[in-house]
Amino acid sequence: MEAFDVLGDPVRRRILEHLAHGEQPAGEIAARVGEEFGISQPAVSQHLRVLRTSGFASVRPDGTRRLYALDPAALDEVEDWTAGLRRFWEQRLDALGTELARGARERRRATAAGADEDDERPTDTTRRTA
């Protein structure tokens, strides 16, 4: 299964978010994720199996419990893939930053020009007496 197929499922993404906080027993993951998504313990177990077989999670026995942990190697592969596309994002973000700076500069100039016009208006400080 491709990495983005695995990460495309919101239940699996949520499980990974839980595992990012450290190793956790399968029962606790099943209870939290099952309640959040309204799915059964066997359904959560299937998602854990997909994460394990695709390399996103590892499991180790601890007595009668199975402890799951995030395996960062699979996430490194995803990051490497996106790094190849990052240069396109960076170019567009740099261009956006330039346009935002240009707009801010023009607004400052317009505001300063308006303030200068206010300073040039004559004010009548003399009082008329009748």
Image: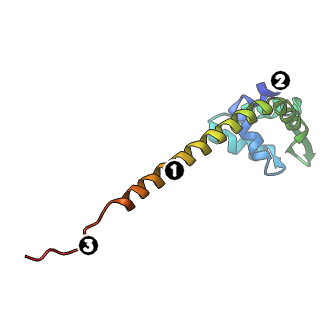
Q: Quadrant of the N terminus?
A: top right
> Where is residue 53 drawn, in percent x and y?
88, 29
Which dot marks residue 125?
Answer: 3
Which dot marks residue 58?
Answer: none
Left or right: where 63 falls relative to 31: right
Which of the marked residues, 2 or 3, is nearer the chain's N terminus? 2
Q: Quadrant of the C terminus?
A: bottom left
Residue located beneath label 1 in the image: 109
Q: What's the residue at 47%, 49% (across, down)? A: 110
Closer mark to the observer between disc 3 and disc 1: 3
> Where is residue 21 drawn, in percent x and y?
79, 51
Task: Find the distance from the CA under tag 1 to the CA under tag 2.
Answer: 52 Å
Q: What's the residue at 41%, 53% (across, down)? A: 114
The disc labelled 1 sits on which kind of residue? Answer: Arg
Closer mark to the observer between disc 2 and disc 3: 3
Which of the marked residues, 3 or 1, is nearer the chain's N terminus? 1
Left or right: where 97 falls relative to 123: right
The disc labelled 3 sits on which kind of residue? Answer: Thr
**Quick one: label 3, few (<14), some, or many (20+) residues within 10 Å?**
few
Instruction: Give the answer, above or below, for where 53 lies relative to 31.
Output: above
> Where is residue 24 drawn, in percent x and y?
81, 49
Which dot marks residue 2?
Answer: 2
> Which quadrant of the view contains residue 93?
top right
The answer to whether mark 1 and mark 2 are in CB contact below 8 A is no
